[in-house]
Image (cartoon, rainbow, N blue to C red):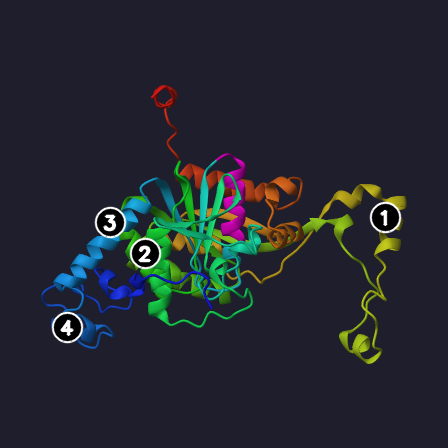
Amino acid sequence: EIRTAMSSSSEPPSAWATQPPPNANQGCVGPTSSTAGKASACDGCPSQQACASGQFNSPAAEAQRKAEADGISTAMSNVSHVLLVLSGKGGVGKSTVSCQLAHTLASRGYRVGVLDVDICGPSCARMLGVTGRTVHKSGSGWCPVYANPNLAVMSVSFLLADADAAVVWRGPRKNGMIKQFLTETEWDSDGLDYLIVDTPPGTSDEHISTVQMLREGAGDVLSGALVVTTPEEISMSDVRKELNFCQKTKIGVIGVVENMSTFRTRLRDLKFSRPTSARESYLCNTDEGADDRTEEVLATLQEKCPEVLDMIASADVFPRSGTGPQGMAKKYGVPYLGSLPLDPNLLESCEKGVCFTEVHADSSGASPFEVLADRIVEALPVEEAEEGEDEDMVEG
């Protein structure tokens, strides 16, 4: 059950289909062409019947498309940059990167919004520390939830009466919700420097709709995509599909970030136990922690070799495939923005909804995350108002 009823504009996506879909045949004439669905290039295309019906280029569709584009243009008029966070693979840390990047940018004084378009698996509310909150709908739109004065969040999780309820929606309803997010969310009246869009895995309806709506309604602020991957081939094989999606839909790739490249933590934060096999533990019904030797090991190290306690212990979590994400980025001609370690303090920060780079500034993963934020700001600079302009505004 959704707390706030969707408006009657939840009809989706047909009105937005002005660009060839990513699964279109080579040589697609476009769904609004007079020969749409009838040209030789249309033979066998999944969208041939819909295009031939004329539903994409009827006067009603064009009027609806224009009205919705105007709505998005108005909603995004004070947004400097929209950054899509993408990955073809689930579980690689898109939401972690989205939310902690938002936290870090907001901690530097930038005005940041996070839009969670993972309709069936929203997690941004927890990672930004705003679970249990609700959005308020006024006559002019939805007011997002604020994690702090510089950080606003919009997610379907705020609209669910039961946080554990499954969102079982087909594509049209998901697209309708995304359209409402884009047209009806009232972001900060002072504007946003960055709107970070956290997406689900793959190249599904949510991605296509978000890209098409933003491009037609506010194409100048769709700055590009940040693509997240882990270093093993199982992940990269899907991420390559995402990079192809970006090429096909003409989304600029700001860069590829390699997440969970290694496990890194201080030696004193590790736990130590007596070696036992899983079979032995099961057969002997060993209590969890019964073989823990952490206290005595750390005491021995403190006595014999205290300098090692603050050394960083690391281990590869995933087997690196070939030249890894850096080689993949080079092959596709896009920037490689570096690697982020699997840091327990980063995971804890996401669970608690706090800013990792502030709360754990001395943690092994904090510096790489700061560098990632630096590179995003460098790639997508925000124009600062001239001092004289600010004074004129105050006087006015």
Q: Which of marks 3 and 1 is nearer the N terminus?
A: 3
Q: Which residue is drawn at 37% across and 31% down?
A: 383
Amino acid residing under circle 4: Ala
Region of the chain picked out in magenta, as a range: 96-109
Furthest toward the front, the residue is 139
Q: Which of marks 2 and 3 is nearer the N terminus?
A: 3
Query: Where does label 2 land, which residue?
Result: 211
Query: Is 205 displayed left or right of 167 in the figure?
Result: left
Q: Where is residue 33 in the image (x, y as percent from the top left)?
A: 12, 63
Circle 3: element type:
helix
Give the alpha-carbon distance from disc 2 to disc 1, as whole Å. 55 Å
Query: Where does label 3 land, which residue?
Result: 70
Disc 4 and disc 1 in contact, CB within 8 angstroms? no
Circle 2: element type:
helix
Disc 3 and disc 1 in contact, CB within 8 angstroms? no
Query: Where does label 1 land, which residue?
Result: 301
Amino acid residing under circle 2: Val
Sort mark 1 into few (<14), some (14-19) or many (20+) by Cα contacts within 10 Å. Answer: some
